[in-house]
Image (cartoon, helix red, strand yellow):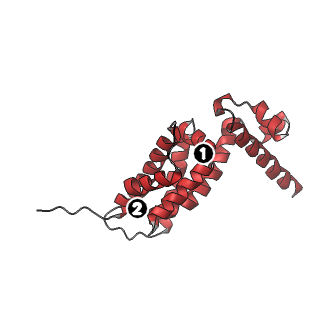
Amino acid sequence: MALDARLVRTRAALTAALLALLEQTAFDQITVRQITRTAGVGYATFFRHYPDKQALLNDLAAREIRDLLELAAPVLFASDSRAACLALCRFVDSHRTLWSTLLTGGAATTVRAELLVGAGRIAAARPGADDWLPADLKVVWAVGGVIDVLTWWLRQARPYGYDRIGEILDRLVVGPMTAGPVTRRP
């Protein structure tokens, strides 16, 4: 049991160190030595937990994705999609440096794939009332739209506030998805 607690503490220290370093330095410029020095753990200890710094980033990303999915699931199924979009954008904004690294760096493909899997699980557990939009397409559209809008936002030199991006997400991605089919006039 003590070994499990030590494992948890060490991984938490490595994660916190990576987050602290990301506030000051681009991921590509961070070394394992910097991470271990900041975490206060031995260099060799790092490699008992992760094969490289990308694996540490992926572990961190998986946790962030779980947290984001808790906020993103309501976007797919909420009656108040605007509030759900605002909550999602507020979360990303509060972890802006990390999400910038995840979405604009080398982890973007992994993040998208993990979000698709997680959102797909959530959608499968909730029978949809949509008769015009297949649930799997709804997940692909929502995840793709959310990722693309967030990535664009995080790349802006003078970023918009999370409230504006939440509104954009709701109007551009979620609203049209939940509005129902377009009826054609004769």
Image coordinates for residue 21, horizontal then vertical, percent: 72, 37
Residue receiving disc 2: 135
Farthest left residue in view: 186
Residue 50 found in image quarter: top right
Q: Position of residue 65 (x, y in %)?
A: 59, 52
Question: Residues under labels 1 and 2: Cα distance?
Answer: 30 Å
| 21 lies left or right of 2 | left
In this view, the residue in front, 48 or 140, is 140
Camera-near label (1 vs 2) is 1
In this rendering, the answer to whether 23 lies above or below 134 is: above
Q: Is residue 152 left or right of residue 40?
A: left
Residue at the far top in the pictured view: 29
**Looking at numbered disc 1 in the image, what kind of residue is underneath it?**
Arg
Residue under label 1: 96
Residue 163's tag is: none
Q: Where is 129 relative to 64, above or below?
A: below
Q: Judge left or right: residue 96 versus residue 160.
A: right
Q: Secondary structure at mark 1?
A: helix
